Image (cartoon, helix red, strand yellow):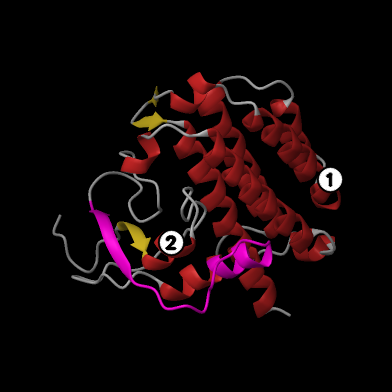
């Protein structure tokens, strides 16, 4: 397979804004996709500014309007699931120990994302939740997908979590009318487990098939996956408002 413009790619982008305004957790949670343009290193400014605006709205001291530069740290074009932000090989920062300070920052951001997600869907009528788009999932199906993935990411790291299977079942079976409540219950349970990760869990490297799973990879995927689908729902609702 040739490395040309038709092949999707995964980029890890470091921005000057991250170095100037970000914490040690960096831009954990930022997820954007773009076509592979040969020789391009411009990143995705609109997506970066949108994520900075999200952080600012929750009190982080960042400047979405400030100029910044981007640099491609690694460009991956081989392996499965390319172009979706999480190739089997992972990224170098995934394999660094997760400090208590960075865990706290990541959990704070994850809580903000979850709060915004629930606020977005809270008053949606059942008909809109179940409306089938021309392509893709219904909003309720997106929420189910987010919850199932979230549970899998945690289990990869910690193994069995008491109450998790029941919480996931509630999201699936109690339907759109209870979605805000069942998601809240699920995320309260998973966040409580993440909050007490041990030093051993924060440094472990666990093999799952092609993947090597770590606490940093777990947090990265939780954050960026929630952000990705929060934006998907927001854009869909904006288009039909």
Instruction: Look at the picture and state if 97 lies above or below 158.
Output: below
Residue labelled with disc 1 = 181
Which segment did they paint magenta?
Answer: 52-77
Residue 131 covered by magenta stretch: no
Residue 231 position in % (x across, y down): 59, 65
Residue at 62% x, 43% y: name it: 107
Residue drawn at x 40%, y 52% is 85
Left or right position of 151 against 95: right
Q: Please tell me the numbered disc located at residue 84.
A: none
Q: Name the residue: 65% across, 79% down.
A: 239
157 relative to 141 in the view: left or right: left
Q: Secondary structure at mark 2?
A: helix
177 above or below 43? above
Pointer 2 local density, CA inside 10 Å: few below 14, some 14–19, many at least 20: many
Residue designated by label 2: 18
10 in relation to 163, above or below: below
Q: What residue sits 43% from the left and 64% below the top? A: 20
Does 19 appear above or below 114? below
- Mark 2 to mark 1 CA distance (whole Å): 35 Å
Query: Which numbered disc, 2 or 1, marks the residue that appears first in the sequence?
Result: 2
> Residue 29, image x and y in percent?
52, 53
Q: What percent of the width, then of the height, locates residue 123?
A: 85, 63
């Amino acid at each position: 397979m040739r490395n040309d413009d038709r092949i999707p790619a995964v980029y890890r982008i470091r921005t000057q804004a991250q170095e100037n305004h970000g914490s040690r957790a960096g831009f954990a949670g930022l997820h954007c996709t773009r076509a592979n343009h040969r020789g391009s290193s411009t990143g995705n400014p609109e997506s970066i500014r949108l994520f900075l605006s999200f952080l600012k709205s929750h009190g982080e001291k960042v400047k979405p309007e400030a100029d910044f530069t981007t640099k491609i740290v690694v460009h991956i074009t081989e392996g499965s699931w390319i172009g979706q932000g999480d190739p089997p090989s992972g990224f170098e920062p995934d394999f660094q120990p997760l400090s208590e300070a960075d865990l706290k920052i990541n959990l704070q951001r994850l809580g903000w994302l979850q709060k915004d997600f629930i606020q977005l869907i809270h008053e949606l009528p059942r008909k809109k939740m179940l409306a089938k788009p021309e392509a893709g999932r219904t909003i309720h199906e997106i929420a189910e997908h987010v919850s199932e993935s979230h549970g899998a990411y945690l289990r990869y790291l910690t193994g069995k979590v008491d109450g998790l299977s029941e919480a996931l079942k509630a999201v699936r079976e109690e339907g759109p009318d209870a979605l805000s409540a069942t998601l809240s219950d699920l995320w309260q349970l998973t966040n409580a487990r993440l909050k007490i990760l041990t030093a051993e869990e924060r440094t472990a490297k666990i093999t799952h098939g092609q993947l090597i799973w770590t606490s940093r990879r777990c947090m990265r995927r939780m954050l960026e996956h929630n952000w990705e689908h929060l934006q998907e729902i927001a854009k869909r609702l904006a288009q039909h408002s």
